[in-house]
Image (cartoon, rainbow, N blue to C red):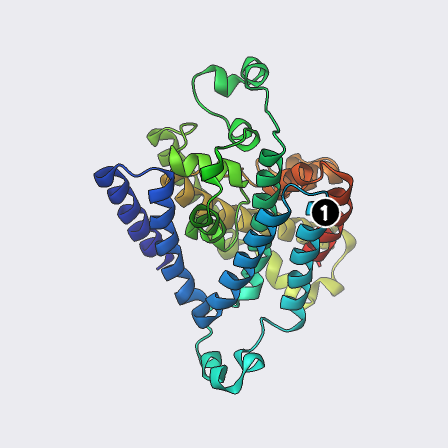
Amino acid sequence: ILTVVFGAFTLIAATLRKVYHLKARGMSIVWLLISVIYLVYLHGACIFFILSIASVNYLLVKMFATTKYFSFVLWTFNLFFLTCNRVYGGYSFSYFGQHLAYLDSFRGTFRWHICFNFVTLRMISFGYDYHWAQQGFRFDQEKHTQRCSVCKSGRTCYLFLQERSLDRNKYSYSIYLCYLLYAPLYIAGPIISFNAFASQIDVPQNTYSIKGVTLYGLRWVFSLSIIELMTHLFYYNAFALSGLWKHLSAVDIFIIGYGVLNFMWLKFLLIWRYFRFWSLLNGIEAPENMPKCINNCHNLESFWKSWHASYNKWLVRRCKDKTAKCVGYIHLCCCMA
């Protein structure tokens, strides 16, 4: 069903872009409307909470972007709601008056505060990209092009899109909301920076050709067939869940644990690459999670950088100043908890 839905969304967006020659502003409105429809199905009336928090965050970023209190305000606001969302279980409309209590019957099919963790990362990303643009941060494009093999070939790499500042009109409310709610990456990511997203919604990515995207999709289908074979032929999860491993030898327990770990790696690979595939079809390249096989990670640092590579890149880029670095690690602990 999700494939049919994303296929319809992709067809609508591509048709409107081609017919009306839409750029950043036009495509942001198209994808915002599509994504709102998607979120109404997922979260029902709870989309009100998402839009309200996102709107206040936008106002705070615009107000404090040029002040020395920016990092403190941005992180405090986002961590506050990240905590409250979890403590209050996504809130109840009855908190705001009994006349709104009936809306609690229309909460959709998926808990909104679970997905909001990714929205929080995007709100912070927008804030810092706008903050650095206001401070006049300049990316050395010439130096980067000399070192980057992708940019040398005439294409545009993700790092270039992420680091260069945009025109001020790109930091508009419509593009901001489109970035937060962009349907293909909304549920599970991968996480993309605002600058990279806004650049590609204006001019679609050129890193992957049509053939490259097609091969990417075929590799995903192959990976799906592998996990289907694993679930039918190997019983690692059954041993782990049933408790039979308690009666086995140490070597058998190691084999079961190793098998479960590989199964989990392949499962998350399928999830992240599925959503990234649909994003690529729509011209948005997000960082690849799990670029390396889990069996090719020889230490914890390599494992972390490879497992959730897009989040690692997000975390490293947000930690350019001391305040962000401190609360960034707090946020990492909150998300992992």
Quarter occupied by residue 81: bottom right
Q: Quadrant of the C terminus?
A: bottom right
The residue under the point 49% across, 79% down is 104
Q: In this rendering, is residue 282 above or below 254?
A: above
Q: Please say whether residue 197 is visible from this viewpoint.
A: yes
Q: Is residue 183 rendered to the left or right of residue 70?
A: left
The residue under the point 67% across, 54% down is 256
Q: Measuring from the top left, give residue 294's x and y in whole percent.
A: 63, 40
State the residue in front, 78 or 38. 78
Q: Please say whether residue 110 is visible from this viewpoint.
A: no
The residue under the point 42% across, 43% down is 279
Q: Measuring from the top left, give residue 180's x and y in whole percent.
A: 50, 51
Q: Measuring from the top left, give residue 39's x and y in whole percent.
A: 42, 62
Q: Is residue 100 rendered to the left or right of residue 73?
A: left
Q: Measuring from the top left, give residue 219's x and y in whole percent.
A: 43, 38
State the residue in front, 107 or 235. 107
Q: Amino acid at mark 1?
A: Tyr
Residue that label 1 marks: 69
State the residue in front, 186 or 162. 162
Q: Quadrant of the N terminus?
A: bottom left
